[in-house]
Image (cartoon, grey):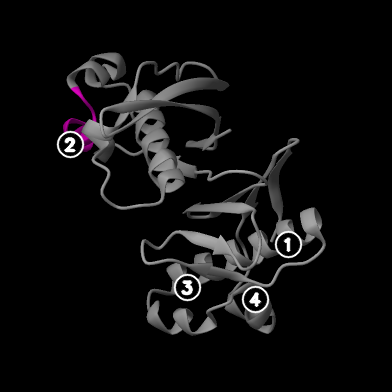
Amino acid sequence: MPLFKKIIEENYTLVVWHLTEDEGYFVPYLQEFSFEPKKLSEIHFPQRRLEWMASRYIGWQIAKELQGNCEGIWSDSHNKPHFMNSPMQISISHSNPYVAVLVHKKHPCGVDIEEKRDKLIRLAPKFLTETELALSNGDLDKLALAWGAKEAIYKMYGRKQLVFKENILLTELDAHWDKGKMNSILRIDNKNQIVPLEFEKFHNHILIYTI
């Protein structure tokens, strides 16, 4: 499983892997990296099973690097992953053949890998406000950045009642840069929280994550 990218900052570590292994590589470690290995039996699509194991294996490895041990990863009722008996936070994303795992030492986090796909043009009115549609202007890079940003914040928040067009708002979409930073707004109960994000383009994908 070749390492594609690793970003280490004071409060977080982000790893992106190019997934080439089969299930047999991860199965011997299943009882160690997952606190709920029986969940694997609920996943029937082979690629999803592989991504599920790979992402938790990577998170397990990062946690061991940061705190010396890891008792495994479990998912709550909203399918948000957590480390067992650890204050560290984790977020996971996958877009074949890549798997990304973000581990933050202090607070909830979110990561997304988004492939630049034409169907984002058709879907844009469903997840973007009129202002955001104008900012994107049908540009595929900007649409992928917008979708990825909202997905990352959705994962950071960790509960399913968010509406992309109402609760996650974007004021900028500078996707002409190969990498950069941007701010977004998480609006809950008419209160706005500024959420900073960082993004990077690679191989027809956009990687974006909360910082």
Q: Which residue in the structure is indicated by mark 1?
A: 61
Binning the other alpha carbons within 10 Å of mark 4 as few (below 14), some (14 to 19) or many (20 upward) gives some
Q: Which residue in the structure is indicated by mark 2?
A: 126
Q: Which residue in the structure is indicated by mark 3?
A: 49
Label 2 sits on what residue type?
Lys
Q: Which residue in the structure is indicated by mark 4?
A: 26
Residue 99 visible from this viewpoint: no
- Please give the range of residues in magenta: 121-129
Label 3 sits on what residue type?
Arg
Q: Is residue 162 magenta?
A: no
Residues marked 1 and 2 touching at CB (< 8 Å):
no
Q: Is residue 128 magenta?
A: yes
Q: In this view, does 181 lie above or below 100?
A: above
Label 4 sits on what residue type?
Phe
Q: Main secondary structure of the magenta part?
A: helix
**Which residue is depicted at the point 30% across and 52% down?**
160
Q: Reading the chain from its start, which is encountered first: label 2 or label 3? A: 3
